[in-house]
Amino acid sequence: MGDREANEGQADGPTWLMKMEERAVEEMELQSVSTADSSGGSVTGTESNTSVHQSVLLDDTYDVYNRDIIESMEWQGRKLTLPEAQGYPETGSVLEQLDRTSVESILWDPSSRRLHLDYYPGDSDLTVREILMQKYPDLQPLLPDRLFENLDLPDRDIKLLAALQDDIFDMFCDNLNNQNPNHLYGIPYYSSLLEIACQMKNRVKFVKVLLDNGADPNITNRVTGMPLIHATARSGNFEVLQLLLEKEGIDASLEDNEERTILHWWARVSEKNPDDKEKLKKCFELLLDKGFDNGSRFKDKDRSDSTPFSTAVEREYRDRVVLMLDTDIDDIDDTASAHMNEILESAKGSFVKSILGYCFESNDERVNSQGLKVKLKSVALISMIMYALDSHHKELFKHPVLSAFINIMWNRVKYIFFFDVAFYILFLAFLTVYILFSELCNIQMNRGVANITNDLLSFNNNNLTCGMSDERRYSTSQSLWYILMVLLGLLVFREGCQVYINYMDYIKRKENWLELLLIVVTSTSCSGIVDSIEANKHLFAFAILLGWVELILLLGQLPLLSV
C-alpha cells in the first residue's frame, strides 16, 4: 500500500530504514508477548521470531486499510503479509511449507481474500499462485482473486496503482506524478511502481510511460536487493526486458545479492509462451550490444558456483546453449572456451548430440520441398567441432548436421587445401632430391671423404663415376639449393600467417610443432653451418623423416580419411 510520506520524495534511505526497523522491533515484541501469554507465562519462540523478522522492512506509516489487513491475516502467530528473512512476504514460504489440509484451512479463512499471491518468492520464476496451482490443482477454486486496489480511494498513489492493476491507461497517466514517477509501495508489495509494472503481464505501455517520465531502470529493490532487470527476467516479461535493455543508460552489469548477473537469470528462466524463445534471443542480442559481448561473462560464477552456461546446460535449454556457443569466437577468451567444453563434457551424451539439432534454422518448409532453406549456425558448429576434437565424443562428426556443415566447409576450402598440399609436396620433393643428390654427388673438394663402393656407383675423394662433370654437378646442386631455399621461405611465410591468424590454436596443435622442427632441421642442414659430413647425414635423414610424416598427417585431413 502507499503512504504519503514516502510519496514526498521517498524519504532518505537511513531514516526510511530506521523507521521500518523500529516497526519491526515493535512487531517482534508484540509477538513475543503474545507467545509468552499463550504458553503460560514462559517466553518461547523469541529467537525464531527475531531471525524470521530480522530484515523486516515496513513502510513509513500504517494507514487504517493496511492495519486491518495485517491484524486480520495471521497463521500460528506469523503475519503472512510481513516479509521473511529474505525480504519477501511470508505468504509464499508458509503456504509452501504446509500440507494440503493446512493450506486449505488458510484459504477458507475470509481474510485470505486480501492475501497477495501474485509475487515471485525467492528464486522461483513462478508466482505463489502458480506454485499453489501446480502443487494443489484441486484447491484452485479457493485461491483468492488477484489483489486489486480501490479505484475510488482519494489517495492519488493508491489510485495510480489501481489503474495499473486494472489496465486503465488514461487514469494511470492522469494520476502519474512527474516529479516522483516511481512511487515506493509498502505492505504487501515492498516494491516501487516501476517494479510492479515490470512484473505484471501486458503492461508494456505503462512501463514505457514511467521510463519516459524519468523512472530509473537501474533501481534495486530496497528489501530484496534484486535489480529491476533481474526481477523482470525472472517474471518472464521478456518484452518489457527488451524495453529496459534498449533504454539509454541501462547498466547490464548489475548483480543481485547472490552475485548473479542478468545473464544468469536469462539462462535460467523458463519459457512459458510459444514466442518466448524468439524474445529471449532478442534479449541476448541486446545484452551483447550493451557491453556483455565479452564471452568471459559466460563463465562468471555466482555464490553457488553456477555460471550462465552451466545453468543453461543443467536446465537443458538447448537454444540458449547454442546462442552462447554461437557468440563470435573473437569475443570468447580461452578460459571461457575451456569452461564451456568442461561443462559439455560433464553433460549427458544425448544432450550434447541434441544441441546439434538446434544449430540450424529453416524456413519451415517441408523436408522434401524445393523451397526448403536451411541456415547453419557456423560459429556454434565450429565450437562443437573444436569440442569434438578435444573430447571423447569423436562420434559427433558423424551427426547429420555436423557432417553437412563439414561438407559445406570442405567444398569452400578444398581448392585452398589442394593448393597447400601441392605446394608442400613440391617442397618435400625438392628437399628429398637435394638431399639424395648431395649424398650421391658430393663435390666438396679438399675434404677427406672416405671411398664408398656399392654395386651401382663408385666414387673417390676427387671424381665421381656418375657421368657428370664436377662443374655440372656443382651447378645442379646449387640450382636445387636455391629452389629449396625459396620453397623453404614460402613455407616459413605460410606458418607465420597461421601464427598471426590464430596464435593460441597454432601453439596447441602438435602438427604445427612438427612443421617448425622440419623448418629448423632443413635450414640447419642446408645452410652449411654444420661442417661435419656425418652430422649432416643425420640431419638429412631426420629432415626426410619429418617431411614425409608431415605429408601423411596433411593427407589425413581429407574428409574421406579423417571422418
Image: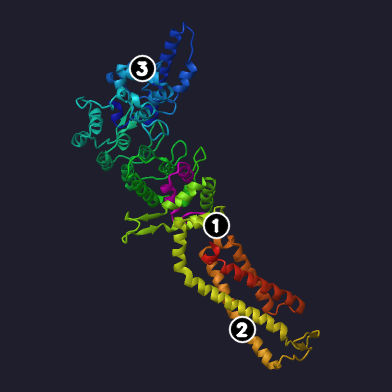
Q: Who is closer to the viewer here, 417 or 232?
A: 417
Q: Who is closer to the viewer here, 485 or 196?
A: 485
Q: Residue at x 47, y 22 (%)?
A: 51
* Residue 410 in sight: yes
Q: Nearer the viewer, mark 2 or mark 3?
A: 3
Amino acid type, label 3: Ser
- Give the labeled residue for mark 2: 482
At label 3, counting other C-alpha atoms closer than 10 Å, the crowd grade (few under 14, some 14-19, many 20 or more) is few
Q: Residue at x 70, y 94 (%)?
A: 469
Residue 130: image x %, image y %?
A: 35, 31
Image quarter of residue 552: bottom right
- Measured in 3D between alpha carbons, the distance from the residue under mark 2 to the one under mark 3, in whole angstroms, is 97 Å
Q: From the viewer's perspective, is residue 474 above or below residue 550?
A: below
| Magenta span of residues | 308-333
Q: Does 165 lie within the magenta span? A: no
- Measured in 3D between alpha carbons, the distance from the residue under mark 1 to the one under mark 3, in whole angstroms, is 60 Å
Q: From the viewer's perspective, is residue 49 above or below residue 519?
A: above
Which label is found at residue 389? 1
Amino acid type, label 1: Leu
Q: Earlier in the sequence, mark 1 or mark 3?
A: 3
Q: Earlier in the sequence, mark 1 or mark 2?
A: 1
Image quarter of residue 411: bottom left
- Give the labeled residue for mark 3: 105
- Asked if labels 3 and 2 touch by Cβ distance under 8 angstroms, the answer is no
Q: Who is closer to the viewer here, 103 or 338?
A: 103
Image quarter of residue 216: top left
Residue 156: image x %, image y %?
A: 22, 29
Q: From the viewer's perspective, is residue 145 above or below residue 203?
A: above
Q: Residue at x 36, y 29 (%)?
A: 128
Q: Earlier in the sequence, mark 2 or mark 3?
A: 3
Q: How many marks?
A: 3
Amino acid type, label 2: Tyr
